[in-house]
Image (tube, rainbow, N blue to C red):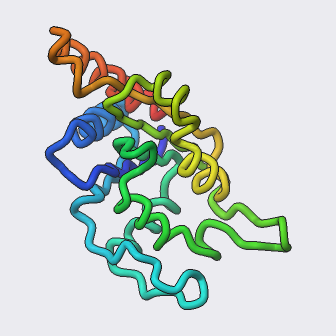
């Protein structure tokens, strides 16, 4: 059994991402995994890193809780929508604020660093209104910022990514409800496996 931390990274709790986070959490809980969860839209914090690393801003309670949950978990799950081929600004602001030296990494030289969050795996679940293959073809790797620049940099491995696309436009094709139920089942099963 794993300790699983779920971050619902859509600012709006009335969203498909929220439903998928519920499905992942249900699957993980029913399989016996220990689960903690935070919803980005309910967190209270300033998402702007005003002075970079020169002055470390005081952490709000939700940021301290987030850091504690990341340190606690074996498996970190982030669900978010792809907006303009990247994560929502508020989600990026969360990582800007908490992914600090001595928490996520420690520079040991000009081109070397210690990854302080090793021993943890991660799962990214990304939704989009575009077919994932087409999005990759036109815009390139739209998950690299979180996958490599944030999670891998801090030591997470393996990092698995599941993309679900063409979610908004399937209704006019006549199989929108079926498609969404299929996506929910897949996410539920990922939760059961804590993968």
The residue lying at 23 percent from left, 42 percent from top is 18
The residue lying at 29 percent from left, 50 percent from top is 10
Is 168 displayed left or right of 99 in the figure? Answer: left
Q: Position of residue 44 (x, y in %)?
A: 26, 73
The residue lying at 31 percent from left, 30 percent from top is 129
User: Foreground: 18 or 2?
Assistant: 18
Count of residue discs = 0
Q: Residue furthest bottom?
A: 55
Is 41 displayed left or right of 155 in the figure? Answer: left
Up the image or down, 190 lies above or below 68; here it is above
Q: Which image quadrant for residue 38?
A: bottom left
Up the image or down, 125 lies above or below 80; here it is above
Q: Position of residue 132 (x, y in %)?
A: 45, 26
User: Foreground: 32 or 136?
Assistant: 136
Q: Which image quadrant for residue 62?
A: bottom left
User: Foreground: 66 or 52?
Assistant: 52
Is 172 displayed left or right of 161 in the figure? Answer: left
């Amino acid at each position: 059994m794993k300790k699983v931390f779920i971050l619902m990274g859509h600012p709006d709790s009335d969203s498909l991402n929220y439903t998928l986070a519920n499905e992942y959490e249900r699957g993980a809980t029913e399989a016996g995994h220990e689960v903690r969860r935070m919803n980005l839209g309910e967190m209270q914090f300033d998402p702007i890193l005003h002075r970079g690393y020169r002055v470390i801003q005081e952490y709000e309670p939700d940021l301290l809780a987030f850091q504690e949950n990341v340190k606690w978990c074996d498996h970190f799950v982030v669900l978010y929508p792809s907006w303009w081929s990247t994560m929502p600004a508020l989600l990026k602001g969360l990582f800007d604020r908490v992914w600090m030296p001595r928490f996520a990494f420690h520079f040991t030289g000009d081109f070397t660093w210690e990854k302080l969050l090793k021993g943890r795996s991660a799962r990214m679940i990304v939704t989009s209104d575009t077919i994932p293959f087409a999005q990759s073809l036109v815009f390139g790797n739209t998950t690299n910022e979180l996958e490599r620049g944030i999670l891998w940099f801090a030591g997470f491995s393996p990092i698995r990514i599941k993309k679900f696309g063409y979610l908004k436009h399937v209704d006019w094709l006549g199989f929108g409800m079926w498609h969404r139920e299929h996506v929910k089942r897949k996410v539920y099963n990922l939760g059961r496996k804590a993968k």
